[in-house]
Image (tube, rainbow, N blue to C red):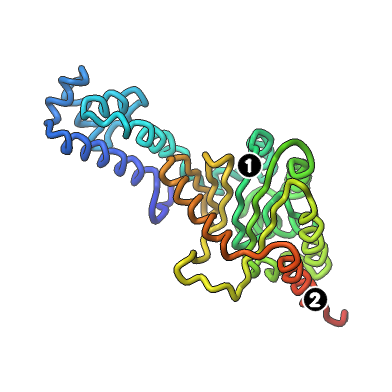
Amino acid sequence: MSTFPTSSVQEARAALAARLRELRLDAGITGKELARLAGWSVAKSSRIENAVTAPADADIRVWCAACGAHDQADDLIAANRQADSMYLQWKRLQRTGMKQLAETSAKLYERTRHFRVYASHVVPGYLQTPGYATALMRTIAGFRGTPDDVADAVEVRMRRAHVIHEGDHRFATLVEENVLHHRVGDQDVMAGQLGNLLAAMSLPSMSLGIIPAAATREAIMWPLEQFTVFDDSRIHVELLAAKVTITVPSEVDMYLRAFARLTELAVYGADARALIVKAIDALSWPRP
């Protein structure tokens, strides 16, 4: 697996082991004493503390109890569960094409009630038109060398998008202005996509804010990687090489705070529509 600069699986395991060791040291007990309190062998404590063996949820609770740190258990368990699933290469996720990945995420979209989405590169999937989604997926498939099932994957994505029209789902969507100007597909595809954004603004489920390119970011928030928050408990971060899943409460909170700050930069209503119309006008040129 390629190494992600801040959180590969091995780094996550090592970080968890280091946190467990710190708890033991803060409690003022030796590894031998912790093993006695936990009812384990000294070898097991050593393997966990040196990231040789991944602990079970129950092991973490016992470790925290032995160290008098019950309040740390939930965060550490979440970090432990995240380690194996946090970094999944797109090559692995899309090894059979894009359709299966889209179908898998459809269930998550169905059960999620509150979405918070920050789009810094492309229009969020649930707001994409068929033409835009097709052009984008063809580019991705060509770049990553994945099987070409684009037509089927687009069909699944369009079906998945029904959540913005049905049920009690709510969408807080932030889009960087430059996304409106990134050419995905030809002029007609982009015009249709931008028109779809205008139409989506009237949906009861949708709050759509545009962050102006000229917004003053000093002391507020810099542009980030594209991410989606599901019910304030799970986050998907989209990188070039992989999808990172975040569930550790403290890290989820960090993204929620970032989203709140980005919200301060966005414009809504008439001001947002004006930026979208401006992008549509920029598409106009004499056809050959």
Give the side of residue 69 with respect to residue 28, left or right: right
Question: CA separation, marks 1 and 2?
Answer: 33 Å
Q: Which mark is residue 281?
A: 2
Measuring 83% from the left and 67% from the top, which residue is drawn there?
188
- Circle 2: residue type: Asp
Asked which quadrant contains residue 153, the reply is top right
Mark 1 sits on what residue?
114
Measuring 70% from the left and 67% from the top, which residue is drawn there?
180
Secondary structure beneath disc 1? strand
Measuring 25% from the left and 27% from the top, which residue is drawn there?
63
Give the side of residue 66 with respect to residue 105, left or right: left
Secondary structure beneath disc 2? helix
Instruction: Using the image, determine if residue 33 lies above or below residue 207.
Output: above
Q: Position of residue 75 (x, y in %)?
A: 37, 36
**Between 277 and 152, the one nearer to me in the picture:** 277
Q: Position of residue 225 (x, y in %)?
A: 53, 59
